[in-house]
Image: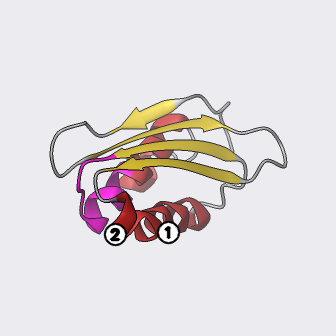
């Protein structure tokens, strides 16, 4: 990681979107995903898996993620997660293009 990581967020609380808020976690804390969703009972594990997969692809190991879902599709969940990671400083902006 080139820069110091800072808290970041992406998304909205509109219908069919997801608000992803991230903060660096303590060393050794792992990936912690706190999820609120209108479809938690049906899709909670799938939403957490979609977020965790993007985080794992970026080799992030210690992070706290708060996700507030309003029925977002997988592609939206992945895009919001990737954007929040970029804003946090994990991904250099030129790699997003």
Residue lying farthest to the right in this orientation: 28
Which of the two discs, 1 and 2, labels the residue nearer the N terminus? 2
Say the numbered circle drawn on residue 42.
Answer: 2
Q: Position of residue 21 (x, y in %)?
A: 46, 37
**Is residue 1 rendered to the left or right of residue 55?**
right
Identity of the residue drawn at 47% across and 49% down: 35
Say the numbered circle drawn on residue 83.
Answer: none
Magenta-colored span: 69-80
Q: Quadrant of residue 44?
A: bottom left
Identity of the residue drawn at 39% across and 46% down: 83
The N terminus is located in which quarter? top right
Which residue is more in the foreground, 97 or 71?
71
Question: Residue under circle 1?
Answer: 49
Identity of the residue drawn at 34% across and 69% down: 42
Crowd class of label 2 (few under 14; some 14 to 19; many from 20; radius 10 Å): few
Which residue is more in the foreground, 48 or 3?
48
Number of numbered discs present? Answer: 2
Q: Position of residue 50 (x, y in %)?
A: 44, 67
Identity of the residue drawn at 44% across and 54% down: 95
Q: How far is mark 1 from mark 2, CA to CA?
A: 13 Å
Would residue 3 be counted in the magenta stretch?
no
Q: Quadrant of residue 89?
A: top right
Eyeballing the image, is 39 above or below 4? below
Would residue 75 be counted in the magenta stretch?
yes
């Amino acid at each position: 990681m080139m820069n110091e990581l800072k808290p970041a967020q992406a998304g909205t609380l509109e219908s069919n979107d997801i608000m992803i808020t991230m903060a660096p976690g303590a060393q050794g804390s792992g990936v912690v995903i706190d999820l609120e969703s209108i479809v938690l009972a049906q899709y909670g594990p799938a939403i957490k898996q979609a977020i965790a997969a993007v985080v794992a692809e970026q080799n992030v190991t210690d992070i706290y993620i708060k996700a507030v879902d309003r029925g977002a599709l997988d592609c939206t969940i992945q895009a919001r997660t990737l954007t929040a990671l970029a804003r946090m400083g994990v991904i250099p902006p030129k790699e997003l293009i």
